[in-house]
Image (spheres, rainbow, N blue to C red):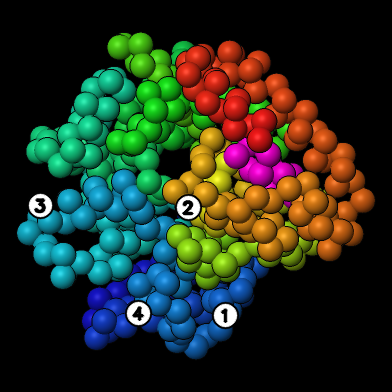
Amino acid sequence: MEKLKVLLDFGPKQVEVGELALLEKRIYFKFAASFLDGPWDISPYYLKRSAQIQECSTSLFSGLFGVFDDSLPDGWGKLLVDRKLLASGVSLEEINPLMRLSLVGQRGPGALIYQPAEETQNKPAFLALDEMELEVVKVLSDEPTAYLEDLYAVGGSSGGARPKANVGFNPLTNELYLGHLEMPENYESWIVKFRSTFDVSDMAQVEYAYYLMAKEAGLLMSECRLFEGQSGRFYFGTKRFDRTPGNQIHLHSAAAMLQDNFRLSSLDYGHLMECAFQLEKDIAAAEKVLRLAAFNVLSQNRDDHSKNVSFLMDAAGNWTLAPAYDLTFSQSAHGHHSISVAGESKNPSKKNLLQLADTFGLKNANDIIDQVYASISKWPVFADEAGVSRPSRIRVGKALKN
């Protein structure tokens, strides 16, 4: 039997959550008795606050409950974790979710941490983003790199398909620290993205323009900016909203919370509105989801899957919809939105958005949609401010007019 202790790390205060156990390829979880006396419900829908031993009823998360699967990397991060395990002599057949969680340790998203954790280095080997990108390209091209451990240290806990690095940023000096844990004083936790194999050359500028456009549309977003490398290439960066000075915030994706296969989602924005309303106990939460739906529909962001929507729980057990993230131009491979809008996923319109609003009795839906429309119409302004190339300005602008 393999076991891992699970804790919530709220900065100076750590709370034991319970224990995960792997026995004969099945994973079980049991809450610590002391945890059940507290105000925290880390996964309100599918993980019961019970003293009984529990086993997840779905195979979506390789036997884990979704809240623990949220701690695991996917895409780029999973690639780095598996490369590290293979390099240490572990075969693919031997790799299991608890092994991956032990590698995540305390470096994952949100506030959940796992013990015992595999030790990883923290001292950064990179001095500049351009240097790091060269090694990222080698990994993506399946070429050998001498910096696998270093890439893993800063990116092995990241989610999403694009290569990412968890870094420190000092807003007082505009300096980057290309390490993750134990950052120097005055440094904030940020995520920097690198291009994937199929991204356009100005992917960072396009996403930054979308950030400016989303703020104008009234969406709550964490601070974002462009970082310029010595080569003149730009990298998109965003401040982590699950970290504050000396504190971590519990994070739970909509995909994991609602047991949705984000690659073949069955969710509608109506489900997200209902979920947000139940968690926040405020109709304003449903309005926030409507605004996000309107922005994704009108800005042609069809990669709006359920892992790109999350909720946050603070140390007092209060839930809120997380700031919007991963907003950019995306037509998607199949031409549909990942999450449907009042049942429509191929060509959702204002009519579908108003149907959603009517279901929840939202009185100001037209005002919300009109504000989003107004921000989308200013695409050329935001594209210029972000330094988007002329071909990308034209390509995205043409799609936004359809």
Identify the disc placed on residue 87.
Answer: 3
Identify the disc placed on residue 334.
Answer: 2
Q: CA distance from mark 4 to mark 2?
A: 34 Å
**Do the residues under discs 2 and 1 have CB atoms within 8 angstroms?**
no
Q: CA distance from mark 2 to mark 1?
A: 36 Å
Residue under the point 78% across and 46% down = 350
* N-term-proximal mark, 2 vs 1: 1
Give the quarter of the figure containing the C terminus.
top right
- Region of the chain picked out in magenta, as a range: 290-300
Q: What secondary structure is the magenta-colored segment mainly?
A: helix
- 373 in relation to 160, above or below: above
Q: Which residue is at the far bottom?
A: 52
Residue under the point 30% across and 68% down = 98
Q: What type is the residue that disc 1 sits on? A: Lys
Identify the disc placed on residue 27.
Answer: 4
Query: On the picture, is 154 further left or further right than 144?
Result: right
Q: CA distance from mark 2 to mark 3?
A: 36 Å
